[in-house]
Image (spheres, rainbow, N blue to C red):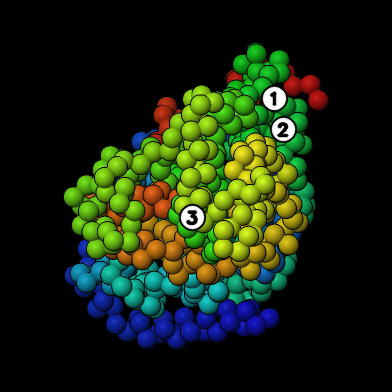
Amino acid sequence: MMKWMSVCLIAAAVLVLARAAFADASVLAGLEFKHGIAFFNELKYPADFEHLEYLNPDAPKGGAMVISSQSNFNTLTPSAEGATLAPGLNWLTIETLLLRAGDEVSSFYGRLADGIAVTPDQLAIVFRIHPQARWNDGVPLTAKDAVFSIQTALAELQGAIWYGFIDSVQLIDERHLAVHLKEPMTLNNIIMFTYLPIYPEHYWTVHDPDAVSMDVPVGSGPYRISAIEQNKFVEYERIPDYWGRDIPVNRGLYNFDRIRFDVYRDATVVREALKKGLIDHWTEQDVRYWHDAYDIPALEKGWLRKIRRNFHIEIGVRRAVALNNRLPRFQDRRVRKALTLAMDFEWQNRAIHFGYQTRAHSYWPDTQLAATGLPSEDELKLLEPFRDQLPPELFTEAFRFREINSPQDFRNNLIEARQLLLEAGWEVIDGVLREQASGGAFEIEFLSTNPEDSRILLPYFQALEVLGIRGSIRLAETSQYTNRLRNFDFDALLRNHDILLPPVIELKSFFDSSTALEPLTNNMAGISHPALDHLVVQANLATTLAEMVAACRAIDRVVLWGYYQIPLYAVDQPRTVIWDKFGQPDFEPRYLPAFPAGWWYDPVKAARIEISR
């Protein structure tokens, strides 16, 4: 109720602001509005572009796609606390001011906004709302809706964190709003506007956005809900006269007449549903199943396909061991390096992952941001002030985890690990590694909610046992796991460490000292170093690609040489199993393909498939 009252007060404030702002539109004088904004380069597409190259503007409309969801949804309201929003709702029915290009690393084009301008001092971004934009109840979508949505986001705890760079928002007239920034504009600011949903002010000021409700709200997107059953399915139908069907960024998108999400809580059930043809595709995260679980007659006949897709906007480390650096025994770099040397990635890849995985030798491997060779001149300028606080090897050696190609290689690793532990004040007494000062045994308990973690950890525990370290796994249910993370009550855990390109928007959450003691951030390992704090700031302040690359490479070096975590395998291309009844564009962009929104139903392909249920 209190949050709903806040929304009403925000709406009232918007109306007051509107009356004041309409009297002074001089803020628009001298501004140059463009169809998009590129941060580190020029926009690839000119103002008069007709469609994005990686979409088919002549894609046929029709047919359906059925997608699985593991979301136990119970609401259609956007901010109902403790509730789960229906899958696809924001994607298909709600839009954003900007859309990120899939074939450019830092270019953004107008969607609801047909014009974007930045003031000369870079302290304000002005958006011009598309004159044709409207809600699906026929009400025009205006700048008031955008102001309302931004103000509402800022009034929420999480929104205040993500959009904390906003100082204020000003309604100029029906089509224009100005977002005033606390500091000059950065890439982070622009990226965040691609995630900010624009909600209808006229609807949410008379409906409670915090109430758990299955009432279908008003949207502005290409689809509307046609059928729904809580926790079971939600079906969307295409709106033929959708206002944005012909704007350049949308041409070739949203081709299915129906998109349906069916809820399957268990991944094993999803796989069986796919093989029975109940759903149309599934992106497989477990390479064991990718390897041979889909070897059924339909695959042999070409009806079912296993494809690899581009998605290079996601980079980094898929799985890593996060050591709790807040604990005294993990605060010695020699101990952390010893634990790293005990991880036989090559054996695990052969025995557990069928050789599909690639060791992550960087926190953003296979990108220009990865630290390779020795530090460049630009990196050295950033690192030199902290030379006496960093490992000497960082300046003299190229970093790479040792590859273990034989039992002797692994034995050599363990010999070095034991020596490092001895230098750090730990020695083996009667087969147990003990601290020389206190006599306490060295033990590591991994906190987990997933029994599958044992496949990676049990072989690792065997190596730790050789060093005299006892490893164990504590399986916890979700609430206990979250509470223990909140209180930093763990020794180590397996975690995902993927990040979006360019990574600057999340750097602070992963590597800054301010997040090391802040619960439930991405900095689970508690990484804290003054050099990283400085480098994170520099990466966020970068105004050129070269500056961002230098800062990110320097961050990579500091984290790698610090051995704060043990990176395992790198993020790679998604593995998708799909029924071959769809058409797709001629090529996929490198960074952000339009899957499945840019695909379409092919009745000829579909007709040849025989599915027995």
* In front: label 2 or label 1: 1
* Distance between the alpha carbons at the discs numbered 1 and 3: 47 Å
Q: Are marks 2 and 1 in contact (CB under 8 Å)?
A: yes
Query: Against 193, is 449 above or below?
Result: above
What is the quadrant of residue 204 in the picture?
bottom right
Q: In the image, what residue type sits under mark 2?
A: Arg
Is 294 left, or right, of 320 in this rendering? Answer: right
* In front: label 1 or label 3: 3
Q: How many discs mark residues in the rendered view?
A: 3
In this figure, which residue is indicated by the disc labeled 2?
A: 271
Q: Residue at x 63, y 45 (%)?
A: 468
What is the quadrant of residue 438 in the picture?
bottom right
Q: Residue at x 22, y 53 (%)?
A: 380
Question: What percent of the width, then of the height, locates residue 520?
Answer: 58, 64
Q: In the image, what residue type sits under mark 3?
A: Ala
Query: Against 354, is 316 above or below?
Result: below
What is the quadrant of residue 103 in the picture?
top left
Q: Nearer the viewer, residue 179 or 228?
A: 179
* Distance between the alpha carbons at the discs numbered 2 and 3: 48 Å
Query: What element does badge 3 sit on?
Result: loop
Indicate which disc residue 424 carries: 3
Q: Residue at x 51, y 26 (%)?
A: 408
Question: What percent of the width, then of the height, locates residue 410?
Answer: 52, 31
* In front: label 2 or label 3: 3
* Distance between the alpha carbons at the discs numbered 2 and 1: 9 Å
Indicate which disc residue 293 carries: 1
Is 45 left, or right, of 472 in this rendering? Answer: left
Give the class, few, some or many, for how many residues have Cα within 10 Å of label 1's Cα (few <14, many ≥20).
Answer: few
Is 250 left, or right, of 62 in this rendering? Answer: left
Mark before the other along the chain sequence, 1 or 3: 1
Q: Residue at x 36, y 61 (%)?
A: 532
- Location of the N terminus (image quadrant): bottom right
